[in-house]
Every structure is written in structure tokens, then in C-alpha cells.
Amino acid sequence: MEFGASQSLSVGIEIELQLVRAHDRDLAHEAGDLIERLAKKKVPGAVKPEVTLSMIELNSSIQTSYAGALAELEEQRAVVCEAAGVLNLGVSGGGAHPFHDWSERRVYPAERFKAVTQRYGYLAKQFTVFGQHIHLGCASGDEAVYLVHMLTRYMPHFIALSAASPFYQGEDTSFQSSRLTAVSAFPLSGHMPFVPDWAAFVEYFETMRGYGIVEAMKDFYWDIRPKPEYGTIEIRVCDTPLTVRRAALLAAYAQALAAWLLEERSRVPSPAVYQVNAFNRFEACRFGYMGQLVDPYARTKKVIGEDILSTAAAVMPQAARLGCVEAVRELAEGVRRGYSDAGWLRARLAASGSLPDVVREAAALWAKPNAAAA
Amino acid sequence: MHEIAWFLPAWPLALEELVRFGALLLAGLLGGEVVYRVAGIPRITGYVLVGVACGPHALGVVQGPLDAGARVFIDLALGLIVFELGHRFDLEWLRRNRWLALAALGESAGAFFAIYGGLLYFDYLPLLAAAAAAVGTATSPAVVMLVSHELRASGQITERMLLFTAVNCVFAYVALTLLLPLLHLEHALGWRAAILHPLYLLAGAALLGFAGSLLLLGLARWLGKREDRQFILLVALVVLVVGCARALNLPVVVALLALGMLARNLDDDHVLLPLRFGHAGQLLFVVLFVLTGAGLDFGNLDTVGAITAVFIVVRFLGKAVAILALGRLSGLRAGGAGLLSLSLLPMSGFAVVMVHDTAFLYPRFGAELAAVVLSAVAVLEIAGPLATQFALKHAGEAHPEA
């Protein structure tokens, strides 16, 4: 398995979006109609189906800067919203629909998704959750393996910063992000094994393929995984934020953080990150910025919010070079104020008194040009 | 023997209305289930067939109108359906999608002029042909609503079917009402009645719906977002509007559609929760359709069968023209327009009422033309649900397990 070439630290963004009905704000089943309509439009990047008919996925093209990524996402957002409006569909961010009934979901009629349903049963329909994936370009397979190991320590940051799924199946879960729990149910979720380099990873992959457990990289549902076809690593823990702006901010932070890790190379990857990973991940999902994070390198416990702020400060030189100082600063400012999309959603419920209203307001926020939630 | 007879009921038993109501419910339930299991036919068609079997043309078990108590159930069932249909009418959508608005109007106008032309061809008086065309324009709110509930359908065809039905019902009533002056003048009732009568009907029904929607929204705001409270409120207002419309001699359907449409489109602060009618609604609908079946008139099919067939075919074609022409522009996927046209086939049971009203006011409406419309209703009450079910299933919008 060759690791494809890509420009180091280039960025690609994928976001999965909810399609909601106008009359009761439940999830719609009309991804097919929307994608057919969008096929005739000029959309930068790509719009793709996902496992159920209630979701679509936006893919950006390869970007190098925060400004470029944001501009493209905004353009995609506008085109998709316009097309959805013609079909009277709402489009919304957020990691999970607040009150849909998973058994009502219908699988997208394509071979790939039928196979997933056949294999995973009800898990496939329960997988109607909405995430943002961030691709980071790597110069080599070894660099990719290094970054996966090193970034794992920071996954709680991305969970807390993107958290936007406080409600699930009509209930407040008390989590900031309930979405990742749906991912954990899959047998091939979790994390990459602690391999020293790309050659060792390929050996592991071939062994798994030899057993007939996987056929391709896409069969691993890891929180962060190499994507050799693209020459990238892919961060998969983020909930889809409520605005494209926040999606671009997260990508910028990932880019700056990876640049910093590559440049500093101050630490050697330690298998200890995977010992504490499950604890850290839970803390971030449950408590967001207030959660605790065990730093296996420093052998200390930290508060996730504070750890984000000190990391954001540390990566500023790299952010400056990549043109995303303002983005990282904006994200950090939000952490200081305690802002999260999950909090925004809870505030909407408190103000309006019903979950359909929460969905309506989230869709209205998504529909607003250049929106920023606060 | 004699000393115990005093506590036994007199024979034959004086069966209470409730027994009749319960028996109809039971018969409808079983009939619907049998046709569904045996032939995969929608349960609604089963209810109607049970009604036909019990009706005056067959067993004769059901004769004459129900008493006031049972009537409330029927009115409530119809009221909730028509209100919900009105509530699905989304002005915002039509504003965003002008082609859709044009297609909805075109569907109504197409059906109207197609039937009108067809009847003129058979040498009916233009005025009467127009009245019959207006009646024929409406799709049955009850059938489309119930089939979509039963199939748990959701998607573009379903949404548009409901939207177009709301529009063609309003179109039908408005067209029929606007024909009134001409009918009045024909019968020399004078210009005052000719102008005031339609004005009273349309403005009155709209005002009643408007007042009801204001009350509904105001009280919903006060009650807060609690589904159980809001449901009771809704039932109360629907029944009140039906009652008031009837007392004021206003068209009940227009008043209810206005109530639903205005409640949806005036609700700027979103105080009203989305509607969800559970099993309670289903219960009412069984009896509704059994009674509809009992009231169907197949008696004239042998004499006006050919014209009835033409009526049904041109009506379908008239509906389909605008939908086929504007389908793609309005955002329908390939093949969707044909299915949408088919789904709109059911003819409104209200047509029976409209025909009787018109025939009552104007005996010259013509026994024969009434027979054509009533025969079409009879055929489409049975075939219509089949068409709608076929369309929604083939559109892939039915729930896979429904």
C-alpha cells in the first residue's frame, strides 16, 4: 500500500449535514432529490450521499489557507441551501438530530450503503449522526504515522471545540457530544495501533486484510486514521458545527497544531497516549471544556479548556505562517467565554421550550450567509 | 315466565346509536384488514367497500344519517384532516419556488378546464358543466391524508400531493362559489343575491378561519409548548369552527382550510407545536370511510358509464398537464411528475355535498349531470386510494415496513 503524495499541511474538510422537513422539523428522506438537483449546479468541491437518506456530505477541495477553506465552504453552503429551499428542506449543522427516531431512517439506495446495513444491522441506521472530518496533507507515510500518534493527545480539544450533539432521540444526554458514542458501537472503531512507522502500519493492515477483517482503510472507523489514497491523515472526532465558519476554524486549528508538532518534534510518540485515550475522550464528550485530560507526556491532569488555551498560544508562530492567527484566536476567545455549539443548542431549548424549535433555529443559523453563532 | 318478563327488553331490540356506531367501526376494521391482507389493497378502500356492502344498494344495514352524537365524531375526523391539510400549506415554499406555485395553480386550472371542455363536448349547458368541473377539480383531502399516514410516507411527492390538494380544494370551492352569481341570475334571483351570496360564503369562511387561527395561536402561546394541552386546544377549535360554519351556512371545508393555513402562516413566533395525530385519529377515519362507502351511488353507472369514464380520464389528464410541464423546473426528480399526478386522483367525498347543495339550490343542475359526478365519486372512492398508494410506494416514499 503506497502512501500517496500530497502537500504537507494542506487541508481538506468533509462535513455531514442534516436534512430536515419544514412541517415538523424531523429528519427528511430526501437526500436523493437534493443530490440530483445539485448535480446540475456548479458547486465547488463535491456533494455526496451518506448512509441514510437524511444526510448529505460536503467535501471541500484541497485548501492551503483558512481564508480559502472558509470561502469555499461558504460558497457550497449557499448553493446547497438554495437547492434545498426549492425542495422545502432545511439544512442544519449539529452532530445529531435532537429528536429523530433512528428506526425511521431509510438507507440510501446504493450498493455500498446496502452492504453496510446488511453487515451492521440497526447500527447503520443509528449511525445517522453528523461529523466533520479534517484531512491534513502529509509528505510521507512516516510523517502520517507520527502525526496520528501525536495528535491523539489533542483529540479531546477537537471533541470539546466542535461539540454540538447535546440532544439525542428527544432527550438531553447531559453530554456535550453524544455523537461519538454512536461511533464507538462499531467493532472497528477506536484508534490506530501503536506502530513505529509506515512500513509497520502496512504490515498491520495486511495482516488484518489477510484475516478478512477489512478490505480497505475506510473499514476502520478510528478517531484519527491515515488515508493513503489522499496522502493525508483524517481527524474524525468532530461533530459538524452549526456554522461553516466554525468548521473552518477547527480545520485551521488542526493545521496550526500539526505544523507545530512537526516543527517541534520535541517529543517521541508514547504508547501511553492510547492507555489514557478512552478516559480523555469520555471526559471531552461528557464535559467539554470542563472535562479533564490526562497528559501522558507531562504525567499530569489538566482541564481541557485550559489545555486548549495554552496549546493555542503555543502554536501561534505556526498559525502566523499559515495565515490563521485570527482563526486560532477566535477559537480561543470562544473557549474563554465558554462558548460551544452544544451550549448554543441548550440555550435555544431553554428559550423556546421545544426541540422542533431548536432544529428550526439551527437550520436558520445554517441558512444565514457568513453566520457566526455566539 | 310472565313474572320475569318485566325486566327483559322488548323484542325486537331498540338498538342504540352506539351499537350501530360500534358495529360499523368493527366491520370497517375487519374489512380493511381483510382486503389489505388478501389483496394488498389500502385499508381505506376496504372501509369503503364495507360501507358499500352495508349501504342501501346492498345489505341495507346503513340507512339514513347518523344521530347527533355520532355526527360529532365524523365532523371531528373530517375537521382534523382538513385542518392538518391546511396546516401543511407552506406559503414560504411557494414564495421560494415559483414554478411550484405555478404548477399548483396549473394543476387546478387544468383539471377544471379539461372537465369543462369534456362536458361541453357532451352538450351540457356551459354553466352546469362549469359547476361540475369545479366540483371535480378537488382531490379528496381525507384520502390523500390517510393514505400518507397509513404508509408513513415522507418525501417530495407526498409533500407536493398534500400541497396541491389544499390548493385544488380551495380552487374548487372558490370556482363553485364564483359561479353562483351566474346561476342566481339564470334563476332570476336578482343581482343583490348574485353578488352578496358568494361574498358572504367566501369572506365569511375566511373570516371565521382567521378568527379561529388568532384564538388558536393566542391560546397556544398561553398554554406553552405541551403537546397534550395543544392537542386538546386544537380539537376544541376545529369542532368550534365546524359548528360555527354550519350554523352560519358557511362552507365548512373552506373555513377549516383557512384555519389551518392561517395557523401555519401567521405563526411568526412558532408557538404551535408540529401536529401529530396518533391512533385516536385513525379510529375516527374508519367510521368516516364506512359511511362514505354507504353513501356512494353506483346506481347510474349503466346509464352514464361512458360519460363518467370520460370525466375521470380528462380530469386526470387535466391535472397531469401542468405537473408534467413544470415538474422538473419545480425541482421534481425524473419520473416524479407522473407519480404525483396519479397520487392526486382521489375525488373528494365533499363533492357529494357540493352536488347536493347545488342541485338543491338549482334543480336544473340536472339529474343526469349530478349522476355523472356522483358516479365518478363512487368509482374514485374505490380506485383513488389505490392510485395514491401506488404512487407513493413507487416514489419510494412509503415507510419500508408500512
Image (cartoon, coloured by chain):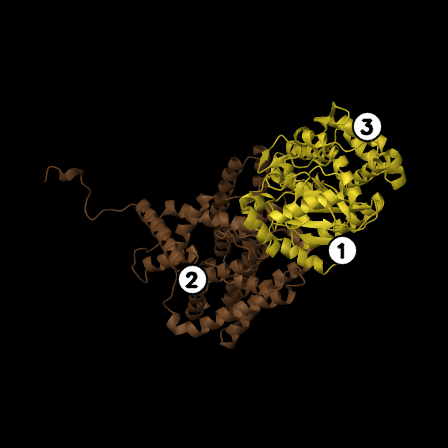
Chain colours: A yellow, B brown
Q: Nearer the viewer, mark 3 or mark 2?
A: 3
Task: Give the quarter of the figure containing the N terminus of chain B.
Answer: top left
Q: Are marks 2 and 1 in contact (CB under 8 Å)?
A: no
Horizontally, residue B400 falls left or right of residue B12, namely right
Amino acid type for the residue under numbered disc 2: Ile
Same chain letter for marks 2 and 1: no
Q: Chain of mark 1?
A: A
- Residue B179: give x, y in percent of width and height: 55, 64
Image-quadrant location for residue A170 = top right
| Residue labelled with disc 2 | B382
Of badges 1 and 3, nearer the viewer stands: 3
Neighbourhood count class around disc 3 (C-alpha, 10 Å): few under 14, some 14–19, many 20 upward: few
Relative depth, front residue between B204 and B276: B276
Measured from the top left, where is residue B127 in percent x and y?
52, 69
Q: Are marks 3 and 2 on the same chain?
A: no
Residue drawn where x is 34% and y is 48% of the image:
B21
Residue B395 visible in the shown view:
yes
Labelled disc at residue A310: 3
Q: Rate crowding at label 1 as few (under 14), some (14 to 19) or many (20 or more) other CA atoms within 10 Å.
A: some
Residue closer to the observer: B340 or B182: B340
Q: Which residue extends farthest top? A: A300
Q: Nearer the viewer, residue A239 or A261?
A: A261
Q: Amino acid at mark 1?
A: Val
Measured Cα–Cα span from mark 2 to mark 1: 47 Å
**Pick the front one: A229 or B145:** A229
Quarter occupied by residue B364: bottom left
User: Between marks 1 and 3, how big is the CA–CA gap?
Assistant: 38 Å
Above or below: residue A144 compared with residue B382: above
- Confirm whether residue B258 shows in the render: no
Residue A210: x and y in percent read: 63, 49
Gap between marks 3 and 2 measured at Cα: 72 Å
Mark 3 lies on a secondary structure that is helix
